[in-house]
């Protein structure tokens, strides 16, 4: 009898784990996925064309809150945890729920799920969302291209739309973002690479993504999501830690695993962290991975635009995942506004509309900033309405995507940009030299 399994996920790692370990395996029968973290990704079906033989009706996706009922009704024998950027305590609470109802609880090892590429892979991951992973991956890609390599970027999945149409996604232009109906969260990850003229791949089936990306590249840069592990076996694994959240590198799943696997660890935000915070993370790195090389890097921020924030009432819009499940109360936009002399940072809560107001309730740690969440049209509409209603003088758009491409912001606005700047030795060039 095939072992009955439920895979717990958030619309990304869960599907990859199914594709690499369970699809086509007669020893298992996956009866359901569950979904959390991301709104509106449950109540759909992993389609038969992706699920493969034996799943003629596909695999249903339910809210994670239904897990006790699903274990009972399907006589589930194994629950597989497959999402990221959660505390170790959270993982064990879910494990306890499964175990108490008679199901085993499983975490798949990286070796079970990483695919082997035909070209070299440089993977960039982090111990938490918002550590500076995206600017690091862009800097890695820039250096490799400067040395003459054809570089393709493969991004951790964000399949929030039609799964069948998202099997393999290739982004080479702004029109491709519209073609795939990308959410704000997807645009935040893809646009900065497109601005630097890199081709970006993503999707649902990362075996097929690997085949397609290999045709465009001599070397692949894996741009990780949240604090997840790479889907491809890396020839070099770079992992970022955030000293402003010192200690999180040992408290979050699977970030601590990534830290233990790293060839090199980049301590970001050294320009804003205290020396005590830097010493704490260095001690924790040495404890988790004493052989890893350690780099220190700043994330300098620039304000771009014709409007000044000095002496003004400012609304700051921050990167959504960093401020929500990433756990940061504020981000780069808040820091930039304060450094450039804003008279006041307006807390948008009194003017929050619809799903934006609900986001503040779900994440009460958020500071006086507006998280740029926009997974669907309703959420994007509520975000635009909140911006319009907030009585500010200037809007600081601190998202990796330029929100002004996807919505109308009638108020004066400026945009932040930040880049990774390694200080001292070793340098990124030294680490990447073998790919020259």
Image (tube, helix red, strand yellow):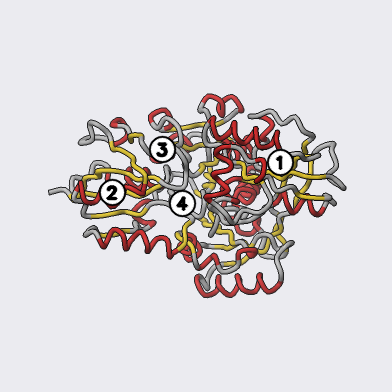
> How far is disc 1 from disc 3 in space, using C-alphas?
30 Å
Q: Does 169 sit left or right of 2 as displayed?
A: right
User: Is tag 1's residue or tag 3's residue first in the polypeptide sequence?
Assistant: 3
Residue located 46% across and 36% down the image: 160
Q: Position of residue 77 (x, y in %)?
A: 21, 54
> How far is disc 2 from disc 4 in space, using C-alphas?
22 Å
User: Is tag 2's residue or tag 3's residue first in the polypeptide sequence?
Assistant: 2
- Whether residue 82 appears in this view of the structure is yes
User: Is tag 2's residue or tag 4's residue first in the polypeptide sequence?
Assistant: 2
Badge 3 crowding class, 10 Å Cα cut-off, few under 14, some 14 to 19, many 20 or more, is many
- Whether residue 124 appears in this view of the structure is no
Residue picked out by circle 2: 6
Any mark on residue 397, and which?
A: 1
Q: Position of residue 413 (x, y in %)?
A: 77, 37
| Residues at circles 4 and 1 in contact by the CB criterion of under 8 Å | no
Q: Does 143 sit left or right of 34 as displayed?
A: right
Per the image, label 4 sits on a secondary structure element best described as: loop
Residue picked out by circle 3: 204
Any mark on residue 426, and which?
A: none
Residue picked out by circle 4: 230
């Amino acid at each position: 009898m095939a072992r009955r399994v439920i895979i717990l996920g958030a619309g990304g790692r869960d599907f990859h784990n199914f594709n690499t370990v369970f699809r086509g395996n007669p020893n298992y029968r996956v009866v359901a996925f569950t979904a959390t973290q991301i709104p509106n990704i449950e109540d759909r079906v992993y389609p038969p064309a992706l699920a493969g033989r034996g799943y003629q009706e596909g695999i249903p996706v339910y809210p994670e809150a239904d897990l006790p009922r699903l274990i009972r009704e399907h006589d589930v024998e194994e629950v597989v945890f497959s999402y990221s950027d959660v505390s170790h305590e959270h993982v064990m609470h879910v494990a306890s729920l499964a175990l108490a109802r008679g199901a085993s609880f499983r975490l798949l090892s990286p070796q079970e799920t990483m695919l082997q590429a035909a070209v070299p892979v440089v993977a960039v991951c982090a111990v938490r969302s918002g550590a500076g992973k995206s600017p690091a991956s862009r800097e890695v890609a820039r250096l490799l291209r400067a040395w003459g390599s054809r570089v393709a970027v493969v991004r951790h999945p964000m399949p929030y739309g039609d799964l069948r149409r998202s099997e393999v996604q290739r982004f080479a232009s702004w029109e491709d973002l519209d073609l795939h109906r990308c959410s704000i969260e997807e645009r935040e990850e893809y646009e900065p690479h497109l601005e630097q003229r890199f081709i970006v791949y993503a999707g649902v089936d990362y075996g097929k993504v690997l085949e397609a990306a290999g045709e465009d590249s001599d070397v692949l840069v894996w741009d990780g999501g949240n604090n997840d592990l790479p889907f491809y076996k890396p020839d070099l694994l770079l992992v970022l830690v955030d000293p402003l959240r010192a200690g999180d590198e040992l408290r979050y799943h699977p970030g601590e695993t990534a830290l233990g696997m790293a060839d090199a660890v980049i301590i970001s935000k050294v320009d804003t962290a205290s020396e005590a915070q830097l010493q704490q993370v260095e001690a924790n790195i040495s404890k988790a991975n004493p052989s890893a090389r350690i780099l220190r890097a700043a994330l300098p921020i620039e304000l771009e635009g014709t409007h000044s924030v000095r002496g003004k009432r400012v609304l700051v819009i921050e990167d959504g995942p960093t401020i929500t499940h990433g756990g940061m109360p504020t981000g780069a936009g808040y820091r930039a506004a304060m450094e450039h002399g804003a008279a006041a940072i307006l807390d948008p809560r009194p003017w929050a509309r619809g799903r934006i107001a609900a986001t503040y309730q779900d994440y009460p740690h958020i500071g006086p900033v507006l998280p740029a969440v926009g997974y669907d049209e309703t959420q994007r509409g509520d975000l635009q309405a909140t911006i319009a209603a907030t009585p500010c003088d200037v809007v600081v758009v601190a998202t990796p995507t330029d929100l002004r491409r996807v919505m109308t912001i009638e108020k004066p606005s400026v945009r932040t940009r930040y880049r990774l700047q390694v200080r001292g030795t070793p340098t990124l060039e030294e680490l990447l030299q073998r790919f020259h």
